[in-house]
Amino acid sequence: MTTINLADRSVDLGEWAAATPNAAEVFAAAVRDWLEANLVGDFAELRGRGGPGSEHEFFAERLEWDRHLAAAGWTCLGWPVRHGGRGATIEQRIIFHQEYARANAPARVNHLGEELLGPTLIEYGTPDQQARFLPGIVEVTELWAQGYSEPGAGSDLAGVATTAVLDDASGEWVVNGQKIWTSLAHLSQWAFVIARTEKGSTRHRGLSFLLVPLDQPGVTIRPIQQITGTSEFNEVFFDDARTSADLIVGEPGDGWKVAMGLLQFERGVSTLGQQVGFRRELDDIVAIARANGSIDDPAVAERLRRAKVGLTVMEANARRTLAGDIVSEAGAASVTKLLWGNWHRDLGELAVAVVGAPSLIGPPATTEGRANDITDPENVELDEWQRLLLFTRADTIYGGSNEVQRNIIAERVLGLPREARA
């Protein structure tokens, strides 16, 4: 068997690869050919759309694209076939993400479900939970938000104050509290929520991992407008919100273990595809530097060289981590986050240095003919490099701040004393 039936999810890609000569090359060609054949017509207009800082762009159209991928068997590649996946090897998953990025295909809308919650349910969920939720993730019919961070517990998830109490009479968990920086919650149907289910518990003890529907009277979602003028982040308020008693992943009190397991999935093979996008950004910046002569400035040239070396190091670290050549899974995830978060933030600063004075002036807004006005975020039109500069300020904060990642490395990898806590 040397061909791939893209739409047949009963075909295990791992088994196919084991029986196929030059499987990696054949698979890469199949991905490239499919993307070339399908990123046409209305979908062609989505190329490059929806990346960081632009998640609001063409959301409905990108959702349709994700469902088109699903129909062709290109979602949830790494999941086991019995759960609706394709049984793809790590190598195949890397190839897919890299070819997808090289094609400049649109940013996916189902990342949290496909890359985070789905693998978590496969690892920790009950058969009933898997049967209920995995098909909706595979088919992109239900979207998920992550209910981790809170106003008093950003990168420090052990400080979660949101509570959930089991109401035996109704057979439901009653959830109260607030989550913040909840990506795309206003467009999602469900959230996986870390809540404190043991009264009087502190830190990582007494937490549970709940699956909570967002379309109910007890949930209020308020978008947070960012400096880029977009609002993919949200505040989510739970006021006696409810979810079924059986929608707890793991046992009550296992929330910390499940949450940490999910975060390991967050920094998986998709980071290599992310780095293809980073390389494209860097290549474009180098091209601008050559065109406007800024590359002749020794300081700029040095920063460009350092950026190229940093990207090479990042790619090598990702491959080493995926190969299992690591001391600690938690430490490896933290190193990965530190590398790409700081590198990408620095790239935003480098981009505006290369572009020069024009980077200080935005193009005129087209909405209702109004002038571009930085004091009116809803009416700001940013170019690619301005958006990169502004949005990447958050890269070293979301998903775990630099400070927290360094603490994890110090304590769990280097064995240094734990940081003093009040």
Image (tube, rainbow, N blue to C red):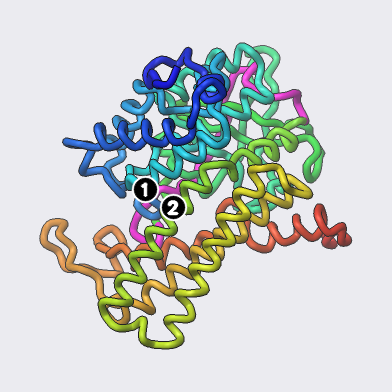
Residue holding disc 1: 102
Q: Which mark is residue 125?
A: none
Please state which amino acid type lies under the numbered disc 2: Val
Residue 36 drawn in magenta: no
Q: Quadrant of the N terminus?
A: top left
x 33%, y 65%: residue: 284
| Image location (x, y in percent) of residue 30 | 37, 31
Labels 2 and 1: the sequence-earlier one: 1
Tag 2 secondary structure: helix
x 37%, y 18%: residue: 7
Mark 2 surroundings: few (<14), some (14-19) or many (≥20) residues within 10 A? many
| Image location (x, y in percent) of residue 32 | 34, 37
In the rendered image, the vertical position of residue 292 relative to residue 240, given as above or below: below
Camera-side residue of 245 and 228: 228
Q: Which mark is residue 276?
A: 2
Magenta part of the chain = 226-253
| Image location (x, y in percent) of residue 330 | 73, 47
> Is residue 307 visible to us here?
yes
Camera-side residue of 249 and 100: 100
| Image location (x, y in percent) of residue 78 | 54, 29
Within the image, what quadrant is residue 317 found in?
A: bottom right
Tag 1 secondary structure: helix
Q: CA distance from mark 2 to mark 1?
A: 7 Å
> Is residue 217 visible to us here?
no
Q: Does residue 295 appear to the left or right of 371 in the view shown?
A: right
Please state which amino acid type lies under the numbered disc 1: Arg
Camera-side residue of 186 and 82: 82
